[in-house]
């Protein structure tokens, strides 16, 4: 009996010697994990990654093995989900495809692992980039796209799907669904009030996510009651906070007022009581708002700040630089009255953003970078937007949630979390962003779909983007 037991124990020992410890693709050791949902930090953890997925998380001091092909020392550093820029554009026509493509490097180098393309005319290229990134032959962020915008006849933006009848709207939605877009973007340059509201309602019936500008010929109540899921920019939210919204809407409908000419009246008739009702409605209907504060301030102060020496212009191609001229010339040639109104509008938007946040309205951090949007640079402008949100009264944690967390919720995607089974789209930063949101710019390493980009690789992405 003893002999049999001895042989059994020996066989177990031999078996244990032949079983190899699991070898992971990547491990980050001794890092402090930021939980954005709870606002907590889990200190000194080891995060094991296989392919594009987080396999497991163990306290570093409890490790039994650290076998991994790539090991990163995260001592004293902070790990959080990769950033999302929830409002970007890929556009400008075929001649600007390659210049737009270089934006992908800039996003990744700045820790942005996901972007939401809010309408453009390069959908075929965007979808090819998506495929190339999936296949590992191109670096860049995950792109969620609306494809072409929906607008009225004679639309401002090239490539827009122009609608003037109910049948046009159905055809436009058929076309976008055939492209398998992630949401529908509606623009307000030429679309009629009736067709705007119809487009929202028809998209909702198809269970398509919608976002957009809002013609001043409709009310915010009509728009949100119709089922829109997000409002891009604050002009339209501000109008919904006016005591005279109905009268302003009617004046726009009859041609007595235009968009810009009505804004001064909108600002002057802001009502806290009306605003509170508007905020409550937005929250109840789960409508997100994209403030885009950074671009607002940049364009409002072009008369005071000469940006022609911006070092970030080195990353912008000559074709896209040319598209900047329109807004620059418009701003510099504006009347003193208009310039004052723009600056008043900018400060009003900052205050409005703070009030939206206090009233629990979902916010999305978006830069609005892309061709035609002067001096709003891919990558770094999202960090500028996070700073602007904190300047509007959000805490650093609240600002960070408007990026990856709310971005995923709006698009009904899995919310990024650092846990077993989570997607390995991560950034390691040197200092704590919950204390200072500017820390998001102090990037040590980016992990995209499980692939690590150390500082040297990130700098190489930036160098490859210089013109």
Image (tube, helix red, strand yellow):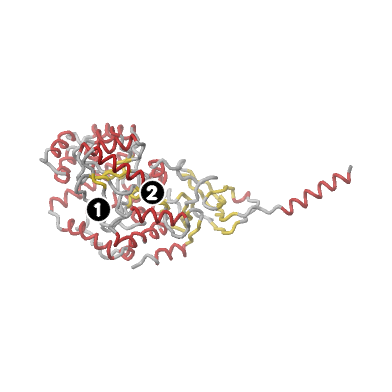
258 left or right, relative to 180 = left
Which residue in the structure is indicated by mark 2?
144
Q: Quadrant of residue 103?
A: bottom left
Is residue 206 shown above or below 417?
Answer: above
Of labels 2 and 1, earlier in sequence is 2
Q: Quadrant of the N terminus?
A: top right
Q: Quadrant of the C terminus?
A: bottom left
248 left or right, relative to 103 = left
CA–CA distance between discs 2 and 1?
20 Å
Q: Quadrant of residue 353?
A: top left
| Nearer to us in this view, 193 or 53 | 193
- The residue mark sitting in front, 2 or 1, is 1
**Residue 437 visible to the viewer:** yes
Disc 2 secondary structure class: strand
Which residue in the structure is indicated by mark 1?
158
Residue 46, position as x, y percentages in the image? 57, 51
- At horizontal 50% and vertical 51% (from top left) the residue drawn is 424
Residue 68, position as x, y percentages in the image? 60, 56
Q: Residues within 10 Å of mark 2 (few under 14, many from 20)?
A: some
- At horizontal 85% and vertical 47% (from top left) the residue drawn is 6
Disc 1 secondary structure class: loop
- Extreme-bottom residue of the structure: 467
- At horizontal 86% and vertical 45% (from top left) the residue drawn is 4
Is residue 164 shown above or below 138?
Answer: above
Please tell me how many numbered marks the rendered image carries. 2
- At horizontal 52% and vertical 46% (from top left) the residue drawn is 42
Residue 21, position as x, y percentages in the image? 66, 53
333 left or right, relative to 234 = left
């Amino acid at each position: 009996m003893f002999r049999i037991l001895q042989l059994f124990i020996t066989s177990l020992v031999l078996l244990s010697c032949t079983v190899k410890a699991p070898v992971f693709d990547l491990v980050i050791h001794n890092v402090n994990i930021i939980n954005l949902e709870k606002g907590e930090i889990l200190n000194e953890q080891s995060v094991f990654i296989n392919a594009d997925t987080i396999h497991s998380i163990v306290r570093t001091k409890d490790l039994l093995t650290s076998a991994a092909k790539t090991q990163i020392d995260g001592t004293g550093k902070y790990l959080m989900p990769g950033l999302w820029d929830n409002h970007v554009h890929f556009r400008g026509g075929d001649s600007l495809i390659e210049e737009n493509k270089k934006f992908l490097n800039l996003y990744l180098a700045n820790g942005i692992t996901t972007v939401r393309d809010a309408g453009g005319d390069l959908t075929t290229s965007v979808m090819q980039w998506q495929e190339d990134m999936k296949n590992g032959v191109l670096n860049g962020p995950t792109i969620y796209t609306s494809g072409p915008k929906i607008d009225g006849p004679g639309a401002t933006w090239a490539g827009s799907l122009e609608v003037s009848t109910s049948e046009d709207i159905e055809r436009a939605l058929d076309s976008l669904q055939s492209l398998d877009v992630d949401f529908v973007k509606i623009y307000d340059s030429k679309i009629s009030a009736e067709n705007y509201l119809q487009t929202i309602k028809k998209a909702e019936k198809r269970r398509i996510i919608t976002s957009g500008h809002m013609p001043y010929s409709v009310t915010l109540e009509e728009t949100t009651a119709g089922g829109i899921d997000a409002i891009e920019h604050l002009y339209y939210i501000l109008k919904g906070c006016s005591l005279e919204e109905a009268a302003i809407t009617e004046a726009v409908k009859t041609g007595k007022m235009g968009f810009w000419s009505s804004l001064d009246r909108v600002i002057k008739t802001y009502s806290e009581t009306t605003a509170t009702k508007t905020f409550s409605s937005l929250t109840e209907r789960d409508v997100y708002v994209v403030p885009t504060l950074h671009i607002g301030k940049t364009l409002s102060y072009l008369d005071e700040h000469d940006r022609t020496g911006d070092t970030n212009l080195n990353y912008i191609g000559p074709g896209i630089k040319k598209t900047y001229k329109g807004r620059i010339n418009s701003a510099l040639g504006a009347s003193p009255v208009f310039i004052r109104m723009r600056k008043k509008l900018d400060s009003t938007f900052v205050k409005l953003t703070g009030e939206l946040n206090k009233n629990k309205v979902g916010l999305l951090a978006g830069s609005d970078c892309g061709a035609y949007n002067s001096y709003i640079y891919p990558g770094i402008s999202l960090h500028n937007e996070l700073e602007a949100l904190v300047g509007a009264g959000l805490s650093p944690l609240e600002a960070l949630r408007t990026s990856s967390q709310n971005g995923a919720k709006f698009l009904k995607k899995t919310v990024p979390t650092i846990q077993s089974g989570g997607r390995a789209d991560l950034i390691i930063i040197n200092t704590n962003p919950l204390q200072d949101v500017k820390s998001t710019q102090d990037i040590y390493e980016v992990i995209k779909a499980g692939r690590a980009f150390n500082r040297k690789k990130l700098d190489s992405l930036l160098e490859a983007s210089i013109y």
